[in-house]
Image (tube, helix red, strand yellow):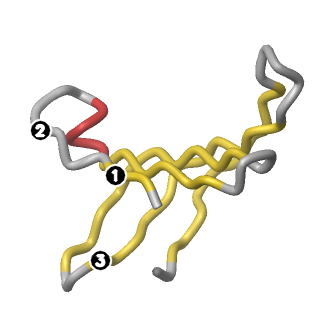
Amino acid sequence: MDSIIAAKTQWGGPGGGTHDIYLSLWGENGILYLGLVIEDREESVIHHFPLEACYGITSHGRST
């Protein structure tokens, strides 16, 4: 999945892990999404939360 990163910051979690948190634009299955992405570097997990899901309108957030 290709993405465009608009703004990025880092957060050290309570367990000492590092997370990258950023606003991103990405495409998936022919649909373009704008939303929040949280990368857990320690566990190599990326969570995508489309903007509409962040506001609680839908629950399209997914993990890869």
Depth order, front residue of 7/11: 11
Disc 2 marks a residue whose amino acid type is: Thr
Residue 36: x and y, percent? 46, 45
The quarter of the picture where residue 15 lies is top right
Farthest-out residue, left? 57
For the residue labelled by badge 1, is the local secondary structure a helix, a strand or a loop? strand
Residue ID at (37%, 45%)? 49
Which dot, 1 or 2, sits closer to the camera? 1
Farthest-out residue, right? 16
Figure disc tally: 3
The quarter of the picture where residue 25 lies is bottom left
The reply, left or right, for residue 49 in relation to residue 55 is right
Depth order, front residue of 12/44: 44
For the residue labelled by badge 3, is the local secondary structure a helix, a strand or a loop? strand
Q: Name the residue under label 2.
A: 58
Q: Name the residue under label 1.
A: 62
For the residue labelled by badge 2, is the local secondary structure a helix, a strand or a loop? loop
Classed neighbour count for the residue bearing mark 2: other residues with Cα under 10 Å, few (<14), some (14–19), many (≥20): few
Classed neighbour count for the residue bearing mark 1: other residues with Cα under 10 Å, few (<14), some (14–19), many (≥20): few
Classed neighbour count for the residue bearing mark 3: other residues with Cα under 10 Å, few (<14), some (14–19), many (≥20): few
The quarter of the picture where residue 9 lies is top right
Residue 60: x and y, percent? 20, 49
Q: Name the residue under label 3.
A: 28
Residue ID at (54%, 71%)? 4
Q: In this view, does 35 lie above or below 58?
A: below
Disc 1 marks a residue whose amino acid type is: Arg
Disc 3 marks a residue whose amino acid type is: Glu
Depth order, front residue of 1/52: 1
Q: Which of marks 3 and 1 is nearer the N terminus?
A: 3
Q: Which mark is residue 26?
A: none
Q: In this view, does 45 lie above or below 15?
A: below
Residue 38: x and y, percent? 58, 44
